[in-house]
Amino acid sequence: MPKLSSMQKDVFSSLIAKQSRYLKPHAMKYTKDEDDAKDLIQDTLLRALSNYEKFREDTNIRGWLFIIMRNLFVNKYRKDRIRTTSIDSEEAIQLPSYNTADSYLNIKQIYNVIESLPKQHQKPLKMHIEGFKYEEINRNLACPIGTVKNRIHLARKRLKTALA
């Protein structure tokens, strides 16, 4: 299978430019957002251009671009899932640092306070602590996302008050 020579980089660039118009509908299926789709297309084209030496002439260039796009989207999705949910600085619960035994007691105290919260606030807060995103909690509890955010906010407030 012949690889492209360095002299053919201009030909390769023009091939990619012709195929780029087919990428937008594909990117919209992944991202469901116009700006994110444009970013994904741009990343795809950059990745293709930087790896042009890996392209083989007998390969379907559109399919190759779609595979690059899918891989970029999946990698970004995985990276976003791994990131922990950050707590706003004003809502962060500051615990003093203690030795291991005292820390264990504080964690027990925190969970005791969580268990004393109203049931409607316990589940969303526990899920949020476990790393679920608001949308996932929303789907799991089958209540509006605003309600989920409000319940988590109220639960955090009560938790901070009880631990103060």
Image (tube, helix red, strand yellow):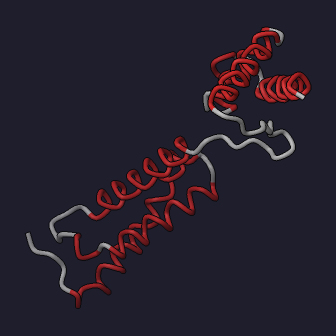
Number of numbered markers: 0
Q: Residue at x 50, y 53 (%)?
A: 27
Residue 131: x and y in percent read 61, 32
Give whichever of 47, 111 is nearer the camera: 111
Give whichever of 88, 149 is nearer the camera: 88
Residue 76: x and y in percent read 49, 51
Q: Residue at x 69, y 31 (%)?
A: 134
Q: Residue at x 18, y 85 (%)?
A: 5
Residue 114 location, quadrant: top right
Give whichever of 40, 104 is nearer the camera: 104
- Farthest bottom residue? 7
Give whichever of 24, 78 is nearer the camera: 78
Q: Residue at x 50, y 68 (%)?
A: 42
Residue 136: x and y in percent read 63, 27
Q: Is residue 91 above or below residue 118?
A: below
**Relative to residue 36, is residue 7 drawn left or right?**
left
Which image quarter holds the N terminus? bottom left
Residue 152: x and y in percent read 79, 26
Which image quarter holds the C terminus? top right
